[in-house]
Image (spheres, rainbow, N blue to C red):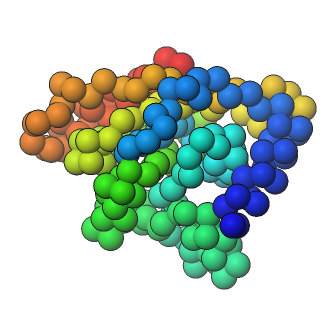
Amino acid sequence: MIYKIGIAVFYVYFKLLFRAKVTGLANIPEGGPVILCSNHISNYDPLLLGSLIRKRKLHFMAKAELFRIPVLGYLVKALGAFPVDRDAPDISSYRAGLKVLKEGRVLSIFAQGRRFKEIDAKDAKSGVALFALKADANVIPIKIEPGYRLFRRMYIRIGSPVDLSAFRGQKTRSDTLKYAADVIVNRIAEL
C-alpha cells in the first residue's frame, strides 16, 4: 500500500517539477527476473525510477545507513529496498538480491554503486554482473539525464536488454564479472 501511494505522489512530483519523460518502457519484460541498471546522479534517483517505471515493483539495494534512521528506515524497507554495506558487501545482501530475482521480480541497481556525475566503466561494480549471471536475469540499461533542474525537461532512457550471452556458462571469476559490468556500464553511457 505504501509503495502504491508513494509512486503515485512522486509520479506527479517528477512530472510537474522536472518534466520527466521516459522512453523505452517497452524494453522492460512483463515477467521474469529483471535487473534495471542505471547511472546514479542524485538521492532522488530511486524515487524517480520507482515512480516513473510503473510496470512492475522495483526492489533497490540501498545503503545500510538509511535503515538506521528511524522513520526513513521503515519507509525505505516498506518501499521494497534492502540494505547493503557499500564498503564491505556481505552475503545477506547478495542473498536478498538473488531472492528477488529467483522469485521473478525486478532488482534495481546503480551500476557504479555511488553517485557520479559521469558514466565511466572504470567505476563499474561487478555485483550487477554477478546477479545477472547467477539468476539468469535480463539486464536493462537505464540512463538518467541531464539532472534535476526545476521545470527543465529531464529524460529517463531505457535501452534494450544487454547481451551477456558471452559470459553465461563461464565461471564467475572477478575478471569475468568486471568485464561484464563494463559492458553494462558502456551500454548505459551509449543511451
Rendering coords of residue 131 (x, y %): 30, 48
Q: With 162 as the anchor, is 65 left or right in this view?
A: right
Rendering coords of residue 126 (x, y %): 31, 44
Q: With 83 as the anchor, is 5 left or right in this view?
A: right
Q: Residue furthest front?
A: 30
**Looking at the rendering, which quadrant does residue 89 occupy?**
bottom left
Residue placed at 38% from the left, 43% from the top?
32
Residue placed at 46% from the left, 48% from the top?
106
Q: Nearer the viewer, residue 165 or 129?
A: 165
**Looking at the rendering, which quadrant does residue 176 occupy?**
top left
Q: Nearer the viewer, residue 34 or 149?
A: 34
Rendering coords of residue 157 (x, y %): 60, 25
Residue placed at 15% from the left, 44% from the top?
172
Residue placed at 61% from the left, 64% from the top?
79
Query: Is residue 189 visible in the rendered structure shown here?
Result: no
Please tell me whether residue 26 is drawn above or below residue 47 in the rendered image.
above
Please tell me whether residue 120 is drawn above or below residue 74 in the rendered image.
above
